[in-house]
Image (cartoon, coloured by chain):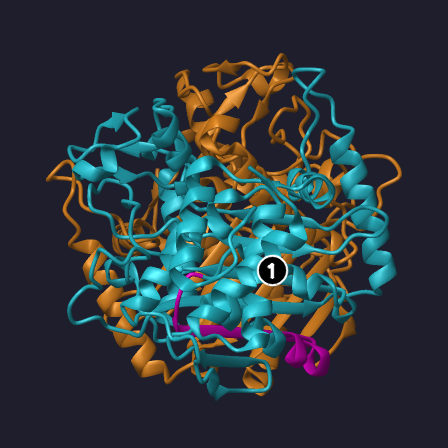
Chain colours: A cyan, B orange
């Protein structure tokens, strides 16, 4: 099913309104989800809507949160999200970071008591639009085992760094710190395909190519896959995200991060509140004139784009380039939804009394 | 050869004094190098001394630099290192970051016109000692090819994140963004061993286990090793380090970063000055009371240390743990130097009129 951007946007806003969100929150939450679908990251877009609704039904998402700063200095702050949608909380936190950066050069905000925040890139790009460098990360429900362990103690904990450029689009490094993101696993599960060795281990800690291995005690592997290839580095990056997002804010961390799925209950005796994010913004002109920086960014991009390649048909991909190509294409030609997602969304619409997708 | 910490420290200070460094700079530079040898990162310690001397002889290292802030806001600054030793410039920049953080919550300093800065962990730990979170990264001479390329366009570009804890030692994530650091390659080269597939590619872009492949047009691979296992993520991290260290400061970046070895000339028409670093500090109590944060860090560390493991004899390693164990051991029992390094250092001492190691 191919849905136009305006239709899918209105549909998504209506779902959030039916959940009880304010008009402003519904518009913002839909904007974050649509950005993900537009950019080709289908696992983080409207496919998540029914999961959000189920968490709301269990009162684990608060549609009318009182989001507030609970601690701050000139350039740092902690935000309590009051169990709101991460989709609206993270942009709130990034706006705080940007205002601090305007006044003092940089701004850094940790968030606790939140939920899934969509794609990190959306939030980091808010800084880029102000000629700032954007940082966004979040912890997530535990699926990944640290090096040498067979226990799921970390989420796919993404980190995003975004840099403005001049004539070229911004460079956006937006990546799960696991060898493969969960979305890639879901694609393999749906299509009945095996996954490459190095993405998953079974409960005994052996590589497996079975995409369903997580159901029988398996776990995702950190970036690097095994110790010999640097999985301790992937673990270290994931730990960094967990500490900046969870420990620094007073959210949960490690195995205590609450699950994104409603059929799993949050762990008993959690050390913190909800899940955590970390957002940051630094003014480029806090370091050098923005036009000089952008000229050098263009030179950097141009040099890497023109690098000699192993396969002459496969050029070096600048981080953020494929997502932008998808966005331009889907804005014009519509957003493809796989049948299962389209069916799921329309069942949701009927249940909530919202106009279905045509 | 086993050398005591005080003897190696005095020796190293004397070498820097012979180079023309001030007393204060010689003491500081030796402290940074010794920290590396103590922590078991032999590739970044005194083994580098003769390389520094050769760069000084070629006037590529300035022993009496006029290190200064050339641009700043309340919480950001750019430092021009005047071609000084990175070993003294990076601590200068981190002190600037820490002072800004004391006043405003956070501080961020990019550095241009610098040289090799030793281990990133040394600089990040300066922040940790002030109950701050420390960030340190640097770009480096090009050895790593981006995903799909066979051209060496990036250094092993390390990033370091360091977090204070309570009863446990700090968590220090200090990692090259390549699959394997160059030091590991050098060990294989010296011992005549092959390296695992996934560390290096030959000029044709195929995995090779030959540790000498870099001499015949090969390149190191980003963390993740190949596209299927996320090497685009390692490339993205390396790009992040290159942009924050090189592009943001006005240093060189990508293939223009000058080589660390004196027998290779710096590239023609460089876009910037020297190599670049990026240092940062954030006050923990800018987000929540430091004692609460540290108690949760202890809980985090304890949980990960006690994770169930695949091999019962191999527990989960907390980032920074092995380096601290080495430091405690070597402080007490001395620092082992391989014969080639000991011989090299004593030849250097004779040449510079410095007391040799016994």
When asked about the image quadrant of residue A271, the answer is bottom left
Q: Which residue lies at the image location 61% right of the left edge and 57% below the top edge?
A: A9
Query: Horizontal and vertical percent for residue A84?
Result: 42, 74
**Residue at label 1?**
A10
In the image, B304 versus A278, the foreground residue is A278
The boundaries of the magenta stretch are A98-116
Q: Is residue B30 left or right of residue B321?
A: right
Q: Is residue A253 positioned above or below B33 on the image?
A: below
Q: Is residue B2 positioned above or below B211 on the image?
A: below
Q: Is residue B257 positioned above or below B104 on the image?
A: above
Q: Is residue A181 visible?
A: no
Residue A114 among magenta residues: yes
Q: Is residue B278 visible?
A: yes
User: Among all residues in the image, which is located at the extreme left?
Assistant: B312
When asked about the image quadrant of residue A181, the answer is top left
Query: Horizontal and vertical percent for residue A233?
Result: 41, 44
Q: Which residue lies at the image location 71% right of the left edge and 56% below the top edge?
A: B84
In the image, B224 versus A266, the foreground residue is A266
Q: Is residue B98 left or right of residue A221?
A: right
Q: Element at badge 1?
A: helix
Quick one: quadrant of the N terminus of chain A? Answer: top right
The chain to which mark 1 is attached is A
Residue A26 among magenta residues: no
């Amino acid at each position: 099913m191919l849905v136009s951007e305006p239709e899918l946007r209105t549909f998504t806003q209506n779902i959030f309104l039916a959940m009880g969100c304010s008009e402003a929150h519904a518009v913002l939450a839909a904007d974050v989800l649509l950005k993900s679908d537009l950019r080709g990251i289908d696992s983080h877009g409207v496919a998540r809507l029914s999961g959000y609704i189920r968490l709301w039904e269990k009162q684990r998402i608060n549609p009318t949160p009182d989001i507030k700063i609970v601690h701050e200095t000139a350039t740092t702050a902690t935000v309590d999200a009051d169990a709101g949608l991460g989709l609206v909380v993270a942009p709130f936190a990034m706006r705080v970071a940007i205002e601090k950066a305007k006044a003092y050069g940089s701004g850094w905000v940790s968030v606790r008591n939140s939920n899934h925040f969509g794609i990190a890139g959306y939030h980091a790009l808010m800084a880029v639009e102000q000629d700032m460098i954007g940082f966004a990360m979040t912890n997530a429900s535990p699926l990944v085992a640290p090096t040498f362990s067979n226990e799921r103690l970390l989420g796919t904990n993404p980190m995003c760094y975004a840099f403005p450029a001049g004539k070229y689009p911004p460079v956006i490094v937006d990546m799960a710190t696991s060898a493969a993101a969960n979305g890639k696993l879901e694609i393999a599960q749906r299509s009945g395909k095996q996954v490459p060795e190095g993405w998953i281990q079974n409960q005994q800690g052996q590589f497996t190519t079975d995409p369903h291995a997580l159901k029988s005690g398996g776990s995702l592997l950190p970036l690097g896959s095994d110790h010999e290839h640097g999985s301790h580095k992937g673990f270290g990056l994931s730990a960094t995200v967990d500490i900046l997002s969870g420990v620094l804010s007073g959210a949960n961390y490690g195995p205590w991060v609450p699950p994104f799925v409603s059929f799993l209950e949050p762990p008993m005796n959690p050390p913190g509140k909800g899940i955590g994010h970390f957002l940051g913004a630094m003014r480029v002109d806090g370091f050098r004139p923005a036009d000089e920086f952008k000229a050098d960014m263009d030179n950097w991009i141009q040099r890497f784009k023109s690098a000699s390649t192993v396969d002459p048909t496969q050029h070096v991909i600048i981080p953020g380039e494929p997502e932008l190509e998808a966005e331009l294409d889907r804005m014009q030609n519509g957003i493809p939804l796989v049948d299962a997602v389209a069916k799921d969304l329309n069942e949701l619409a009927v249940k909530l009394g919202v106009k279905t997708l045509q």
